[in-house]
Amino acid sequence: MKTVVFCYSRFGHGAIVAEAIGRELKAEVRTVISRPRGYPTMGFQALLKSTPKIEPVDARLDGFDVVVLGFPLWAGQPGAPMRTLLRQLDLKGRTVAYWTMNNGSRGELGNLTPDFDRELRAEGARIIYRSGTSSVHTTETDKAAFAEQFARQLTRAMETNTAPNATGGEK
């Protein structure tokens, strides 16, 4: 299946994971770029579900079977620049997987999953797999291992058309 990976990464940790997932899946990687903001602004933007300006990114999905999204969690929500991208993507009928990078204490996916999944489904997406990892306190080796595991689990989910585990997605 032809896959495209979109990633927003303020400090570059997610970009390392995106590139590794792209290599594992032989996928095209597209990066979302936004002007850096301070932590209070980032948190408020996320809580308010704002859509800040991002640099132009190719949002065309023609020819892709699977869309993978990678982003940090800010105040339990996707980093606001990812929301801007989501407004540009046509996810209707698309198979979607995502991963989050979180330095918080709520676990891998934090409190994100129910609300974000509803938003993606409202756009017509079919969520096949999701996962999360810590971002800052991991080595590049850890990030590569996470990417390999994510790619392996996503591939398994696509082959079997089912979620591989409780954090994996819908059955």
Image (spheres, grey):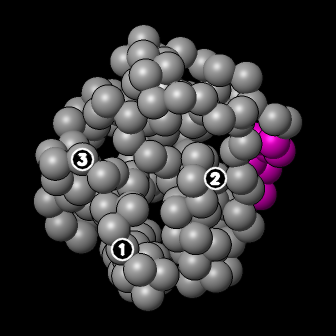
- Distance in Å between CA atoms under marks 2 and 1: 21 Å
Which residue is the extreme one toward the top? 48
Q: Secondary structure at mark 1?
A: loop
Task: Report the label total.
Answer: 3
Q: Secondary structure at mark 2?
A: strand
State which mark lies toward you, 2 or 1: 1
Residue tagged 2: 6
- Examine the rendered structure and indicate whether residue 32 appears above or below residue 160: above
Identify the magenta region.
57-64
Q: Earlier in the sequence, mark 3 or mark 2?
A: 2
Q: Quadrant of residue 165?
A: bottom left
- Examine the rendered structure and indicate whether residue 32 appears above or below residue 80: below
Mark 3 touches mark 2? (CB < 8 Å): no
Amino acid type at mark 2: Phe
Q: Position of residue 48 (x, y in %)?
A: 42, 12
- Distance in Å between CA atoms under marks 1 and 3: 13 Å
Specify whether 107 is left or right of 51: left
Label disc, if present, on residue 138 of the rendered structure: 1
Residue 21 appearing in the image: yes
Principal SS element in the magenta part?
loop
Residue 90 appearing in the image: no
Q: Quadrant of residue 24?
A: bottom right
State which mark lies toward you, 3 or 2: 3
